[in-house]
Image (cartoon, rainbow, N blue to C red):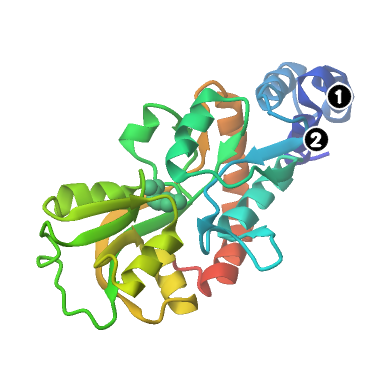
Amino acid sequence: MTTMNRRNFIATLGIAGSAALLAGCSNDTAEQEPAADDAAESTDEASYTLVKEGVLTNVAELGFSPFEYIDDEGTTVGFDVDLSNAIAEKMGLTCEWLPNQAFDTLVPTIQQGGKADICIAGMTITDERLESVDFSDPYLNSNQALIVAASSDATTESLNAAEVQIACQTGTTGDEWIQENLPNATRVPLADVTAGMMGVSTGSYQAMVIDLPVAQNMLAQSFSDLKVLEEIPTGEQYGIAVSKDNPELLAAVNDALAQIEEDGTMDEIKQKWFGTTEI
Ligand code: GLN
């Protein structure tokens, strides 16, 4: 058994089973590796806790296409879904998603523990969130987009006025960007991204600020009457949120992520959802 396979195998067994397995593995590899090393490594790999045995339980806001959304058959799909399935597979686990939750409840849910092991939700690593949860290594770069009606002659400057309503998803980095950069505008925080775009489409709101890859995807799929007025180079990075009480899980997720980058799985998933690996 290779080191990697042994690690995955041990991780599936959890704490209770690891001691028994360790004995077997040590016999296999006694000639290559000292027993003490094996013991240290196995303790590391097996010591994380999961909400449900054998399952990596995810929580996300499920209206963030193409990262996580519910398709016409009612199945949760997207880039993050494929990524978390791949991570779970590397860890010898299966993957489950909790029902949709508002974006601004996700960090508190992970922080409190007991419901979900990870949050993979197109979530930007920020200093403020790092006070409450840990993040994996970054897995994707992102920026913001300012969206207006295709027919609009607004400029970014003209949107900074009290009579202008600008939608965003509550508690997101887009929400924060409006507060910092268009402080005179009337910000409209919403739970649902599609509701925001619909509002811009019907003229209830004059603009929306949302992650650029989501703007590009949703405009191409469903909102041809909207345009990206400005790409805002915020230089964000998405990470997977994990409880600060579960550092061994964070290490295992990072290990799986590194394997996924290394073996080409990440490029496959990028190609599938974005038609390019350059994202
Ligand atoms: N990346 C943005 C953030 O972290 C938006 C995420 C989302 O709406 N799912 O705030």
Q: What's the CA distance linking mark 1 and mark 2? A: 9 Å
Q: Position of residue 74 (x, y in %)?
A: 69, 61
What residue is shown with label 1?
Answer: 21
Residue 149 quadrant: bottom left
What residue is shown with label 2?
Answer: 9
Q: Position of residue 246 (x, y in %)?
A: 57, 24
Residue 229 quadrant: bottom left
Identified by mark 1, the residue type is Leu
Q: Is residue 278 placed above or below 190 in the rendered structure?
A: below
Q: Nearer the viewer, residue 131 or 254?
A: 131
| Residue at the (77%, 25%) spot, across then down | 14
User: What label does residue 121 carry, if any?
Assistant: none
Q: Position of residue 157 (x, y in %)?
A: 10, 65
Q: Position of residue 226 (x, y in %)?
A: 34, 77
Q: Is residue 55 visible?
A: yes
Mark 1, other Cα within 10 Å: few <14 / some 14–19 / many ≥20: some
